[in-house]
Every structure is written in structure tokens, then in C-alpha cells.
Image (cartoon, rainbow, N blue to C red):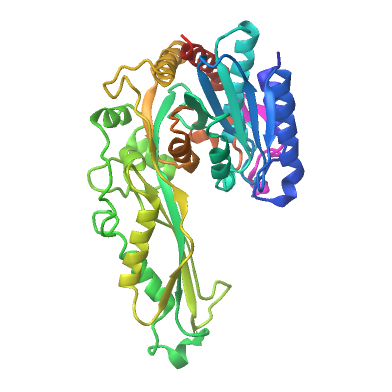
């Protein structure tokens, strides 16, 4: 048996940044570490080559009639920059109190190691448990999983022919109030380019004669929301599925007040669509956001020009049943129709994925005997037993496009246990993982897996 904390510290020490080729050795180190770990647990390991970073499959095989659970994780992490804002080396795991600080500790190496540890303990305690388990660990999640679709198509009828997916790449309201995630917003983004004169112009000599691309850009952007905060694109809300009453009721149980949320964000007031509280808006409302704008002189001092071009990066968070491609086309059509004649508009390639929703059987009024239903019930009981509180069933505002892709290709639904909190600092300096939550979550994962074969 391995020690969960020491194993996690070793795993985290590999700087597996997928987006930067300079970290190729760290990516290889993380793969080799997992391969050896899985083999030490008696699992059959296959390292699947992809156009970029390989995917690891580790299987506990068994009789065909046994339930089959696929556990998802990713071994790649975000870049650690800016390094100077860390209180410790981001790739030298540091324990302070009951938190482990390092890049990847919460996203996703710590939560994933919870399930690895649970399986290791489960197999040690009951080597004959009638359960097939497959760990599926990719190395491109932090860069949009470009190789994952091809992998799904190739393995959907073999290694991924299963009953459900178990993962922990989502969050909970607090370390003692665990959430089972029931939905993820989708995402689609594209870049918009406006071109005016063939070159930057002197604003004194030519000002007043041409349409400034920056002016045109901000006017277009301002037109994309109305006074009520709704996205002002015809057809944008046509396919939206409203949340059910019980989903809103669960949100009302979140143990954070609006005042606390406002203070955490550092804002004077909220800006939400009419009919939604801030906690509802980040879960159930689609959005359109401007992520970055460029145009004209950006250096010190001033430069009196009319820039030749300007651009904006736009992303839209989607809810069921909005289709990413349809929404992207609606945005392009709207901007083309509103674009002033004095400038030319063009677009980058839309990228993203659909929203995902899974309704627990006992929340949707259905009683099922499926493996997924057993897992939900087992997790519900285990969380209350171990953490002392029943879980909340919450949709989450973030996006994991591959989850909807898994559902689309394999038909499999996910049980998503939130094993980090807002204090975990995902993607930020001083990322950390709560070790007390880790110890409890291992017990929850074990009970959940045992419930699958009850």
C-alpha cells in the first residue's frame, strides 16, 4: 500500500505543463510515474499515443457482467507564471497546516489521487470485489483536449464500453459542504477582427474622414447586451432549458451570502440578468464576455493615430440545450449585420463545447437500478456519513467541454464529486489542496465504488 500524501507529493513534483514544450520532461515524468503506480496496483496499463500528449489507460479487468466504472483525470497542469507571486516553489509541494501548496494540487492531481487511493485501498481490502475499473488520464485538458475526440472514437467500443464515468474536476462551496455537480456550462469562443484603412493614419491629417476601427469595435461590443443584462443576439435564448425548481432550491442552500460573495470578488455590486440571483446566474444563465481587446497604440505616452485595425476576444458560456456552433453563427451574423460600412469584419475559428447536465435519479423523480443510480445513492450516503452533511446538488458555471463530448460519443453520464473550493486557487498562484478533505474524500470514493456493485 502506498501513502496517499507522499504519493501525491511525488506526482505533483513533475512540472507537467502541457502548453509549453519546455516542460516535455515533466510531462514524461508524470506519465511514467502514473504508469508505474498503476502497475504496482496490479492494473493493466496502456499508454495510448496521440498527435501530442499520450493518454494513459489503466484497467482492472473482470467478468463481463461486473459493473464497469471509468475514472477520468488529467496529468497536465496550468503554467505556474507569475512565479514571483507564489509563497513557495510551485513544483516543490509544500504542506502548511492542512493544505498542500503546489501547481496541480487541486487541478487535478489531488482530486484524482483521491480516487486512485480509494481503488488501491479497496482492492487491498477486497481483492475479489466484482467491479471493473478503468483509469483514463489525459495530458491535454489544460489546452482544450485536442486529441481527445479521436481517442474517444477509437476506444468507445472497447476500453470505454462502461456504465458510468467518475471524476473530480469540479468544486464545492466549502471543505465541509461537498457538492455533487449536476451540470457544467458549455463554452464557445471566437476572435473578431475589424480592418479600416490600409495603415495607421495621422489623426490630425485624416481624423473625421474615416471610421476608426476601435470606435466601431466598441460600438459593436456595446450592442451585444441590453439594459437588463441579457445577451442582445436574436435567437440566443431560443434553445435554453430553464432549471428545475429543485435545482434552484439547492442553490439557495449554498452556505455563502451575497455580501460574502461580493466581498470575495471585490466588487461594489452585482451585474446579473433579471430573474437570477448571483448564485443562480453563474450556474443557469448563458453569458457573453469580452476577454481581451486590442487596437491602436499600447505603449507609454500617446500616439495620435487612427489605427488600421482592432480585435476582440469573445467567449460565451452556454446552458442546455444551446448548440455551440449555432450560437457562434448567430454571433457572427449579428456582428456582420451591425458592422459599419466603413470597416471590414472577419472572424477566427469558433472553439468550444456543449453544456452538460445529469439529473440524479432521486432528484428527477425516477428510481433506477442502474450503476449510475447506485453510485449517486452511494455517494449521497457516504458524504453525509463522512462529512456530516448531506451533499448539495449543484450545477457549476465552469466548462469541461470533454464531459459533453464523452456523453455524445459513448452515451456515458458522469458522477462528479467536487473536491476543491474557491480557496484552492485554481490556475492562480498558491494553488492548494485541502488534505483533510482528501482523507475524507478517499472514504467517500471507496463507499461510492462499493455501492456500484451492490
Residue 280: quadrant of the picture: top left
- 131 versus 289 height, above or below: above
Q: From this viewpoint, is residue 98 visible? A: no
- 393 versus 214 height, above or below: above
Q: Position of residue 330 (x, y in %)?
A: 33, 60
Q: Quadrant of the N terminus?
A: top right
Residue 135: quadrant of the picture: top right
**Is residue 242 or residue 250 the one in the foreground?**
242
**Is residue 416 or residue 300 the one in the foreground?**
416
Q: Which residue lies furthest to the bottom in this view?
A: 205
Q: Which residue is drawn at 61% across and 33% down?
A: 137
User: Would residue 113 be found to the left or right of residue 68 on screen?
Assistant: right
- 133 versus 52 height, above or below: above
Q: Which residue is drawn at 29% across and 30% down?
A: 247
Q: Is residue 76 magenta?
A: no
Q: Position of residue 133 (x, y in %)?
A: 57, 20
Q: Does the magenta stretch include residue 91?
A: yes
Q: Where is residue 232 in the image (x, y as percent from the top left)?
A: 28, 59
User: Would residue 131 be found to the left or right of residue 243 on screen?
Assistant: right
User: Would residue 388 be found to the left or right of residue 131 on screen?
Assistant: left
Q: Which residue is drawn at 35% across and 55% down?
A: 327
Q: From this viewpoint, is residue 294 visible? A: yes
The part of the chain drawn in magenta is 82-100
Amino acid at each position: 500500500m502506498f501513502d496517499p500524501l507522499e504519493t501525491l507529493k511525488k506526482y505533483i513534483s513533475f512540472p507537467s505543463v502541457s502548453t509549453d514544450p519546455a516542460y516535455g520532461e515533466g510531462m514524461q515524468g508524470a506519465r511514467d510515474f502514473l504508469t508505474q503506480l498503476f502497475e504496482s496496483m496490479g492494473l493493466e496499463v496502456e499508454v495510448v499515443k496521440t498527435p501530442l500528449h499520450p493518454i494513459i489507460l489503466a484497467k482492472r479487468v473482470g467478468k463481463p457482467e461486473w459493473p464497469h466504472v471509468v475514472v477520468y483525470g488529467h496529468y497536465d497542469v496550468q503554467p505556474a507564471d507569475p512565479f514571483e507571486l507564489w509563497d513557495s516553489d510551485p513544483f516543490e509541494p509544500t504542506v502548511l497546516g492542512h493544505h498542500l501548496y503546489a501547481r496541480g494540487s487541486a487541478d487535478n492531481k489531488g482530486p484524482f489521487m483521491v480516487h486512485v487511493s480509494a481503488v488501491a485501498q479497496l482492492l487491498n481490502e477486497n481483492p475479489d470485489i466484482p467491479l471493473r475499473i478503468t483509469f483514463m488520464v489525459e495530458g491535454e485538458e489544460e489546452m482544450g483536449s485536442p486529441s481527445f475526440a479521436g481517442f474517444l472514437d477509437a476506444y468507445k467500443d472497447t476500453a470505454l464500453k462502461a456504465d458510468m464515468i467518475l471524476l473530480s474536476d469540479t468544486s464545492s462551496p466549502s471543505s465541509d459542504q461537498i457538492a455533487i455537480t449536476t451540470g457544467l456550462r458549455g463554452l464557445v469562443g471566437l476572435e473578431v477582427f475589424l480592418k479600416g484603412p490600409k495603415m495607421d493614419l495621422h489623426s490630425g491629417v485624416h481624423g473625421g474622414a474615416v471610421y476608426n476601427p476601435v470606435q466601431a469595435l466598441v460600438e459593436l461590443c456595446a450592442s451585444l447586451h441590453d439594459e437588463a443584462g441579457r445577451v442582445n443576439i436574436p435567437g440566443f435564448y431560443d434553445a435554453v432549458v430553464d432549471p428545475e425548481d429543485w435545482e434552484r432550491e439547492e442553490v439557495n442552500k449554498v452556505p455563502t451570502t451575497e455580501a460574502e460573495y461580493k466581498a470575495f470578488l471585490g466588487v461594489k455590486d452585482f451585474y446579473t440578468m433579471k430573474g437570477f440571483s448571483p448564485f443562480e446566474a453563474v450556474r443557469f444563465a448563458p453569458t457573453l464576455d469580452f476577454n481581451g481587446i486590442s487596437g491602436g497604440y499600447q505603449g507609454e505616452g500617446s500616439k495620435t493615430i487612427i489605427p488600421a485595425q482592432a480585435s476582440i476576444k469573445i467567449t460565451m458560456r452556454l446552458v442546455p440545450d444551446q448548440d455551440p456552433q449555432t450560437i457562434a453563427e448567430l454571433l457572427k451574423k449579428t456582428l456582420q449585420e451591425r458592422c459599419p460600412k466603413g470597416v471590414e469584419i472577419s472572424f477566427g475559428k469558433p472553439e468550444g463545447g456543449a453544456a452538460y447536465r445529469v439529473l440524479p435519479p432521486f432528484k428527477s423523480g425516477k428510481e433506477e437500478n442502474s450503476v449510475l443510480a447506485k453510485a449517486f445513492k452511494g455517494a449521497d450516503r457516504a458524504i453525509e456519513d463522512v462529512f456530516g452533511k448531506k451533499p448539495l446538488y449543484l450545477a457549476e458555471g465552469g466548462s469541461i467541454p470533454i464531459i459533453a463530448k464523452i456523453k455524445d460519443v459513448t452515451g456515458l453520464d458522469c458522477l462528479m464529486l467536487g473536491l476543491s473550493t474557491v480557496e484552492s486557487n485554481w490556475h492562480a498562484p498558491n494553488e492548494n489542496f485541502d488534505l483533510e478533505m482528501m482523507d475524507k474524500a478517499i472514504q467517500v470514493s471507496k463507499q461510492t465504488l462499493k455501492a456500484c456493485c451492490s
